């Protein structure tokens, strides 16, 4: 059922005609994200400039029962922005103001469309940084909506921890303000944490208050290679038990080290690799690095190498951040499925070993990187989109991977979210009462069911 | 309307007759907490032994529309356990099993009735500790329900951060399991964080999974005195900006230092005092202590004193933990109102100065302690319960204190919760849409409205 012309006119009256598009290219680009799932184009793209405009758009959609899909930067991976039931893509990229920076309290307030790299460019001049770093240059609103994280989580937490409060428009078109500028509160239900990770299904996030951090006095970086994944993970388990406040600790499996070497012209030993970063004062960083070097040696680590210059350190971390592209480059023209299982750390080595064995037996190309301090790892499964058999094998492997992770007490997604791509796993991960509770909450905040329908919570 | 005899018989059939009490002493002790608010006794106390028994009790109450108030240790401060509408107190103290300890992953699972000191006694043998330390020896279920915190929050977070997942019985009698053993997840709505802080109004928490931490290699402690509160707070703002991972940083105002000196026979200078604790390796602790000593000096701090022995350190922290009783001891026989405002740290010195001025002008005795790293401070207002005028003055001061805190972007409660004592402040702190959203969630999870009625969210 196409949108009525009168609705488009009303939307134009709210945001300005030049900010409503039905051009084919706009529709297509707004329905497909960076993942492997089929995109579905919306029927119109609407670009509001303020919370008030968002509220008016939502009210118009609610009155007409028109689906509405919030759009940040389009960098999600699980089909979050596909307009499964048609309707409107609400593109928040015009809402890109940094509203306030409170340097003394180390908190900021931004509009939802601000991108994370732009925020960090801005904060650098204040001696501050925002640590959450998914691979993509995502929008802050999108990162809040998917409960994103990245490589700094082991020390700085995820968006769950970073978001202090937000402004959102509920499915009724009402504007809600959650949280406060206090660092903690026991005043009522935690609406902030409820909206974080709700993927635009409970409200359209329009502004976000974030905790940020002081740029560390010293940043140290180091690598170590291991004979097996168990040695690398054992090192990390012990360093966490010792309370060493490591800032980053990333694992690359043998296949990913080979891919990164080829892609970035590096000569890392083709063995499981730990890539570490330490933040703090000079003595603390030296002590952390020294202690972890000893732990690594005890777990069979070799070739402990501290990056001595900023250039060296940046080259190493660039290699890590390029891992996704490095992996894809091993089989040009392929599609990549980035899996996202997260398990208790004690189970991580076994899970990765099982994955590597399964990959070999299935005959796939699938290098692995892991945020090993969180127990979160990504298998980058490559498949030929024109080869139905290979695609089926890739997806069957993915299902086995998730099932192994859930059996170990883990989750099907550590940081990418559900969208519609992981919807089937929700029924495996959560019990029926939890899903019913989620549906009840959805009904309470979006009674017409217009907000990003078909995502996050499977129908009952 | 008294409980029907048949209901008591049915409850007895579920939990055993010896675990249902209508004895006056039991009723009275279960309706009044450690705060200053009027208690209201329930009509029966029911002591289940398992989640299944809780679920059966809730189903019986839902069928009869009988109010049900979960009870942990009774150490709340805002009338959380008062049976405002009568009904049953559901005492979970028999559910005190430590279900599992996963030392490698540093997580534990406990039944809701486990007390925090008992948990730490148990964990000590594993080299682990659970950092959240409200003054009282509260139950873990109660601490989750009130989103409690304490002196370690600046480094280790609050119950919001510590709870990885939980088992709860919703108002329908259905059992829900939330979270997983993974350290993060993006799989659907965050029901864990929704139940944490919901004060028994959305579900009865029966089991809790917690993140715990390794006992630090070295614990260092230090004190410094300041000419004014601004110097102390300025020191803390700067140390947080520098990313120094201080474990504890507590402020005592002049009046509280005097009270503690008298109570614990100490000779601390009667000036605003910072009490600090550092956790880490020997070099990191030495570096942190050294850096903070310099910061303190720069902000006018004097008498920097490091505790050199465990005994000295314990004596200092015992004095801090006894502050509440030390304060009460300054006016024997008085009631104490412990306020709980939490503000952005940059506003803290101004808020405390305004409070001290207001206290003097109002003619109250009211020493202050603060978790200054979180911006959270407690004014312990003493009043004579038989003096209506003094009581009214104390409560009027409290209202002004909260209003100043909210105006500065803070919250009316950093860690004590709402109960019914702070209910009027909810309408000041949250907008109407937020309160309506909370009511919609309440209706979704507890449609009969039997769970702890009259608490947390004001009626519409």
Image: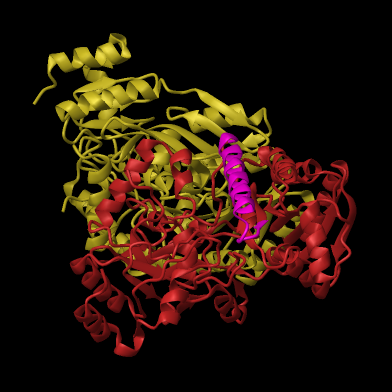
Chain colours: A red, B yellow
| Residue B308 seen in render | no
Q: Nearer the viewer, residue B449 or B455?
A: B449
Q: Is residue A209 left or right of residue B413?
A: right
Quarter of the image that includes the N terminus of chain B? top left
Question: Can you tell which quarter of the image residue A145 is in?
Answer: bottom left
Q: Is residue B444 left or right of residue B96?
A: left
Question: Can you tell which quarter of the image residue B355 is in?
Answer: bottom left
Across and down, in percent, residue B322 comes to 49, 40
Q: Is residue A77 left or right of residue B31?
A: right
Q: Nearer the viewer, residue B162 or A144?
A: A144
| Above or below B431: residue B370 | above
Judged from this view, the residue extending furthest toward the right is: A303
Q: Residue at x 53, y 31 (%)?
A: B109
Q: Is residue A214 left or right of residue A58?
A: right
Q: Residue at x 88, y 46 (%)?
A: A297
Q: Nearer the viewer, residue A374 or A5?
A: A5
Give, as a single range, the part of the protein colored magenta.
A382-408
Across and down, in percent, residue A162 comes to 51, 61
Question: Can you tell which quarter of the image residue A158 is in?
Answer: bottom right
| Residue B120 seen in render | yes
Q: Nearer the viewer, residue A340 or B5?
A: A340
Across and down, in percent, residue A172 comes to 23, 64
| Above or below A376: residue B81 | above
| Above or below B131: residue A447 | below
């Amino acid at each position: 059922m196409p949108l009525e012309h009168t609705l488009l006119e009303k939307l134009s009256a709210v945001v300005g005609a030049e900010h409503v598009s039905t051009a084919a290219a706009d529709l297509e680009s707004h329905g497909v994200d960076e993942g492997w799932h089929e995109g579905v184009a919306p029927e119109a793209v609407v670009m509001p400039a303020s919370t008030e405009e968002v509220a008016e758009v939502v009210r118009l959609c609610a009155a007409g029962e028109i689906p509405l899909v919030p759009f940040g930067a389009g960098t999600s991976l699980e089909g979050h922005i596909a307009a499964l039931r048609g309707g409107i893509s609400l593109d928040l990229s015009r809402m890109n103001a940094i509203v306030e920076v409170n340097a003394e309290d180390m908190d900021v307030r931004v509009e939802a469309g601000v991108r994370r790299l732009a925020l960090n460019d801005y904060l650098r001049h204040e001696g501050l940084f925002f640590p959450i770093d998914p691979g993509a240059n995502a929008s802050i609103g999108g990162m809040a909506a998917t409960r994103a994280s990245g490589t700094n989580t082991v020390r700085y937490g995820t968006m769950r921890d970073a978001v202090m409060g937000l402004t959102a428009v509920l499915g009724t078109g009402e504007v809600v303000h959650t949280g406060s500028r206090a660092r903690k509160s026991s005043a009522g239900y935690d609406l902030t944490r409820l909206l974080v990770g709700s993927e635009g299904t409970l409200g359209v996030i329009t502004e976000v208050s974030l905790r940020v951090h002081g740029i560390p006095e010293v940043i140290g970086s180091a690598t170590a290679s291991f004979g097996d994944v168990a040695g690398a993970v054992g090192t990390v388990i012990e360093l966490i038990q010792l309370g060493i406040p490591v800032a980053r600790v990333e694992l690359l499996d043998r296949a990913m080290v080979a891919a990164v070497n080829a892609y970035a012209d590096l000569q890392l030993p083709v063995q499981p690799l730990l890539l570490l970063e330490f933040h703090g004062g000079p003595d603390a960083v030296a002590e952390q690095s020294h202690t972890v070097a000893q732990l690594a040696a005890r777990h069979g680590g070799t070739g402990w190498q501290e990056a001595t210059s900023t250039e060296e350190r940046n080259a190493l971390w660039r290699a890590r951040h390029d891992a996704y592209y490095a992996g894809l480059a091993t089989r040009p023209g392929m599609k990549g499925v980035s899996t996202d299982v997260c398990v208790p750390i004690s189970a991580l080595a076994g899970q990765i070993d099982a994955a590597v064995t399964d990959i070999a037996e299935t005959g796939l190309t699938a290098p692995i990187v892991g945020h090993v301090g969180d127990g979160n790892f990504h298998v980058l499964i490559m498949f030929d989109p024109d080869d139905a058999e290979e695609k089926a094998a890739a997806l069957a492997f993915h299902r086995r991977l998730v099932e192994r992770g859930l059996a170990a007490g883990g989750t099907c997604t550590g940081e990418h979210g559900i969208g519609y791509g992981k919807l089937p796993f929700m029924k495996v991960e959560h019990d029926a009462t939890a899903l019913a509770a989620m549906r009840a909450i959805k009904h309470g905040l979006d009674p017409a069911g217009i907000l990003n329908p078909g995502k996050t919570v499977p129908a009952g």
